[in-house]
C-alpha cells in the first residue's frame, strides 16, 4: 500500500449505497460521487501520514488485521469494501466511529513519539526521523478532530487510499 489517504464521514444514505454495492466498480462510483461533493466539514485528509498513523495505532504493521479495536479501525477501517493494486476503500460503522473517537481523544504528540520508539515499523517507506514523527503527530490532531465530528453527527467513515 502507498499513496495518499482521504477520510469521508458519510451520511446514512451514502453508507447504505456503499454497503449495497455489487462490485468494485459500484463502490468506486459511489466514492467518486463523494469526492466530487468534497464537503470539507466531513473530510479528513491524511496525505501520506496515514501509513505511520495506522502503524502507531496498531502493532506497527500495515495490515487490516493489525492491532486491537477500536484504534485498529481508525485508519484502515473495520470492513474492506474494495482492495486492489490501485485503490482501497475501508468502512467504519457509526457505532465504531464513536468508539474510535473516544479511543483517539486522549492521544497526543508524546504518545506518538513513544509509539515510534517502541514499535518496529516493518517495511515502512518513511524515514522515522524527527520530521516524520512531527508530521505524523500533526496529522493525529486532524484525525482526532475528524472522528470527533463524525461521531457527534452519527456518521459512518470511509477511507480511500490511492497511489
Image (cartoon, rainbow, N blue to C red):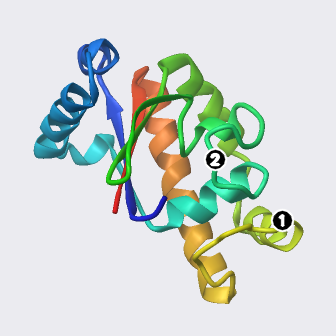
**Which residue position is annotated with label 1?**
119
**Which residue position is annotated with label 2?**
63
Cα–Cα span, label 1 and label 2:
15 Å
Instruction: Nearest to the eye among marks 1 and 2: give it.
Output: 2
Total labels: the figure holds 2
- Secondary structure, mark 1, is loop
- Residue at figure coordinates x 22%, y 36% from the top left: 28
146 or 90, nearer to the observer: 90
- Secondary structure, mark 2, is loop
16 or 37, nearer to the observer: 16
Q: Is residue 35 left or right of residue 70?
A: left
Percent of width and height locating residue 115: 80, 64
Image quadrant in which you'd find residue 32: top left
- Residue at figure coordinates x 58%, y 76% from the top left: 125
- Residue at figure coordinates x 54%, y 46% from the top left: 75
Comes first in the chain, label 1 or label 2: 2
**How many residues crowd around disc 2 within 10 Å: few (fewer than 14), some, or many (20 or more)?**
some
Q: Is residue 110 above or below residue 67?
A: below
**How many residues crowd around disc 1 within 10 Å: few (fewer than 14), some, or many (20 or more)?**
some
Q: Is residue 40 left or right of residue 129?
A: left
Name the residue furthest right. Answer: 118
Percent of width and height locating residue 98: 58, 26
Q: Is residue 40 above or below residue 108?
A: above
Q: Quadrant of the C terminus?
A: bottom left
Image quadrant in which you'd find residue 64: top right
Q: Is residue 103 left or right of residue 46?
A: right
Percent of width and height locating residue 94: 48, 20
- Residue at figure coordinates x 64%, y 54% from the top left: 62
Amino acid at each position: 500500500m502507498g499513496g495518499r489517504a482521504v477520510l469521508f464521514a458519510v451520511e446514512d444514505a451514502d453508507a447504505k449505497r456503499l454497503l449495497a454495492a455489487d462490485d468494485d466498480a459500484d463502490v468506486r462510483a459511489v466514492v467518486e460521487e463523494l469526492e466530487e461533493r468534497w464537503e470539507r466539514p466531513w473530510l479528513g485528509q491524511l496525505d501520506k501520514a496515514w501509513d505511520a498513523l495506522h502503524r502507531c495505532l496498531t502493532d506497527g504493521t500495515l495490515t487490516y488485521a493489525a492491532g486491537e479495536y477500536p484504534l485498529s479501525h481508525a485508519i484502515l477501517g473495520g470492513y474492506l469494501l474494495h482492495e486492489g493494486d490501485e485503490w482501497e476503500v475501508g468502512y467504519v460503522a457509526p457505532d465504531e466511529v464513536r468508539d474510535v473517537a473516544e479511543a483517539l481523544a486522549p492521544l497526543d504528540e508524546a504518545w506518538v513519539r513513544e509509539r515510534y520508539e517502541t514499535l518496529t515499523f516493518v517495511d515502512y517507506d518513511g524515514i522515522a526521523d524527527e520530521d516524520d514523527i512531527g508530521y505524523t503527530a500533526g496529522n493525529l490532531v486532524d484525525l482526532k478532530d475528524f472522528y470527533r465530528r463524525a461521531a457527534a453527527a452519527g456518521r459512518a467513515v470511509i477511507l480511500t487510499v490511492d497511489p
